[in-house]
Every structure is written in C-alpha cells, then in structure tokens.
Amino acid sequence: MPKQNSILNRRQLACGAFAGSAAALLTRAAFAAPASASGDVVDARKAGAKGDGVTDDTAALQQALDAAAENSGGVFLPPGVYLTGELHVRPGIAITGVAAWNYSGPGGSVLRLKSGDAKCLLNLTDARGSSIEGLSLDGRDLGTGVHGISLDRTVWAKHEDGFRIAGCQVNRFTGHGANLACVWAFSVRHCMFAYNKGDGLNLRGWDGFLIDNWFSGNQGAGFAARRENASITFTANRIEWNAQENMLIAGGDGYQITGNFFDRAGTVGIALRKTSRGCVQITITGNFIKRSGKFAGTLAGTSPASDVYGSDVYGSSQILMEGAEGVTCVGNSIQAGRDDGNAGIWSPSYGIVYGGLENCVIRDNVLHDGALKQLIVDQGSNRDGVVVGDNPGRLLAVKE
C-alpha cells in the first residue's frame, strides 16, 4: 500500500492534469452524422458490425475502436445487439450509443457478451481520456468472474486515467459490474450497475466522481473499496438491494457521501471498516438509509433474523464505523423496515454502531423507527474529540 504522502502527491498532480485534459462528451448529433473523410467518427455498422445478436461482432468492433484511435475520434453504435468478446478501448476516443435501457434489462445499443471465457467485456486499462456513453452491457451470467467494465492493473500508472462513463447499464456479469484497479481520476455518471454476482462497482484507486447512478441487486456490495482508496465524491446515487453492504469503504481517505438513497442492504447500509488503518476524513451527510441488514443472518449461516455477518456481530446495522478518524456523520434520515409489500423479515437490529473513533461527530441524525433493538451502539475504545448527541428517534415496534 502506498504511503500516505505518496497518495497525496498523486492526488495533487491528478487535480491539475485531469482538469487540463477533460473534454466534453461527443454529442449524439455528432455521431449521427456520416463519417468524415478522415474517419474521425466511425459508424460501427459501416465498419462491418451487424448488431443482429447472432453474428460475432468482436473483430469489427475492435477494428472500429482502433480506427477511431488514429485520429482521437469516436465510434457510434446504432441501436442493436452486438455479440462480442472482450474489447480494448483505446486512449482518447469516445464510444457512444443510444441509451434506451430500462430498470429490468438492456435496450438501445447493447454489447452482449459472447462467451464466458473473457476476462471482461470492456477493457479500460489503456483507455486514458476516453468516454463511454449510452451503452447497455449484458453479461448473460456467463463464465466465472467475468467483469463488465475492467481496468485491471497491479501497479499505478504515471498519469491520470481521466476516462468518463455516462448513461450506461452494466448487468448480469459473473464478476463485478465495474472493476477499477489502480485507477486514478475518473467519472461515472447516470449509470446502472445491477444484478452482477460481484460488486456493482469495485474500486482500488482515487480521485473519482460517482454521481446519479444505480447500484442495484448485486450479490456483493453495491459499491466496495477494499484496498487503497481516496478522494471520492459520491452524490445522488441510489444503492439498493445488494446482498452484502450497500457501501463498503475499508481504510479510505477523503470521501464526500452526500444526498444518496441507501435501501435494503443485505448487511450494513454504510460500513467504514478498519484494515491496517481506519478511514480518515469522511463526510456522511443528508442521506436516507433504510431497511439494512436483510441477509445478515442468512449469510452467516444462522437464522435470517440474526445480527451476525461473518465475524461481525453488528452485521445488521444501518451505519457501522470502526477505528475511523475525522468522520462527520450529520443530518441523515434512518429507518428500519421490511421488503416491499410488507413482506420478509424486519431489519436492521441496530442504527448507528461506532467504536475506536477519534475527532468524529455523530449528531443531528433522525432515527425515527430507526432500528429494532438499539438506535446508537458505542463499542468503546474511542479517543479524543468524539461528539455524539442530538440523534432523536425510536425503535420500530413490529406488528405482524
């Protein structure tokens, strides 16, 4: 894990570099126009892709991406189903389709995984400064550990990535919806990561904007950062019905978590976990956190109503903070409940659970019907500067 001063130096460099290299996404109107003589915009159909859901379009699509890279141009995918293997996105290009997908499944411009022997569908490892907009990625539950979108490095690049993903749906992959490893400066907006067997988005990296996305029904966490992670703006997202945590941050630094809707997590709604260190400088403000802990006992192999998840006796909780420093948890609305249609188990058992904190504030949160057993749980071992108070609420009185 890089030393803290190394992370800060990279973050400072990334701010200037990313601001200087950012460009507006190519518009759909531009893509709708015929390709220019120089080949700046490539129509995937004209490049040989059929988009009929039967023909293997891998070679034609990759050729289109390679051709666009020669002039830092773009590729337009007209509506259709493009059966494909792994595609390598080139630096400085844009891929745009028609975002006609819905909550339940793909539509418009669909990239459909051909077989389960691929590592991913879209490979962004060398996609510095690229834009991906308006696509549906359909994994078809094929293979094992196949990611929808992947940046798969083991070492950090010498420059920011600066790619942008917008208006895309990434569904039914056997790995993560998006696997971003050693990523540096990126943006994900207006997307949906759903029904994947891993996490919706798995992050190892920093300097990211995740705004106005869905993270829904994944079998891992909705959003998870288990290794080095820092400087993330997480705003106006809906994170719901994921089998594990809706949001998991382990040892993270510098998050702005504001104005999101967290609903029906399998375990903890928002979990700040301690690894070799606790989380540092996290702001959790103005969120609605509802019905967490649905699967806590089931995942632990105990009764569905158990509070335990793995070795964590507070797996059925709305917010969990362990060993953190500099956390502001203020002005959130927290509510217990059960499944839609008044079915399923009631959860969670606990509201806000904390311990081992330093210089943190937990106050002015409203826990009206916020938990079943205890609204606020202090696990002790707190250090200086921990302020907890004015968190009104009541336990939910369950009536079958």
Image (cartoon, rainbow, N blue to C red):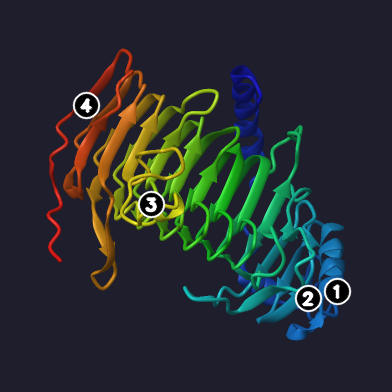
Residue beneath disc 4: 388
- Tell me the distance, in whole angstroms, between the alpha carbons under discs 2 and 3: 49 Å
Q: Is residue 369 above or below residue 37?
A: above
Q: Amino acid type of disc 4?
A: Val
Residue to which mark 1 is pinned: 60
Name the residue beneath numbered marker 3: 297
Tell me which residue sits at (57%, 62%) in the image: 196
Question: Label 2 belongs to which residue?
Answer: 44
Report the side of 284 relative to 45 (left or right). left
Q: The disc labelled 1 sits on which kind of residue? A: Ala
Amino acid type at image mark 3: Gly
Q: Earlier in the sequence, mark 1 or mark 2?
A: 2
For residue 33, which numbered disc appears in the image?
none
Does 276 appear above or below 124? above
Question: Are discs 1 and 2 less than 8 Å apart at CB?
Answer: yes
Disc 4 element = strand
Disc on the earlier residue, 3 or 4: 3
The C terminus lies in which quarter of the figure? bottom left
Q: Residues within 10 Å of mark 4 (few under 14, many from 20)?
A: some
Element type where label 3 sits in the image: helix
Instruction: Please provide percent x and percent y for residue 353.
Output: 30, 35
Give how far apart the Cα atoms at labels 4 and 1 are: 59 Å
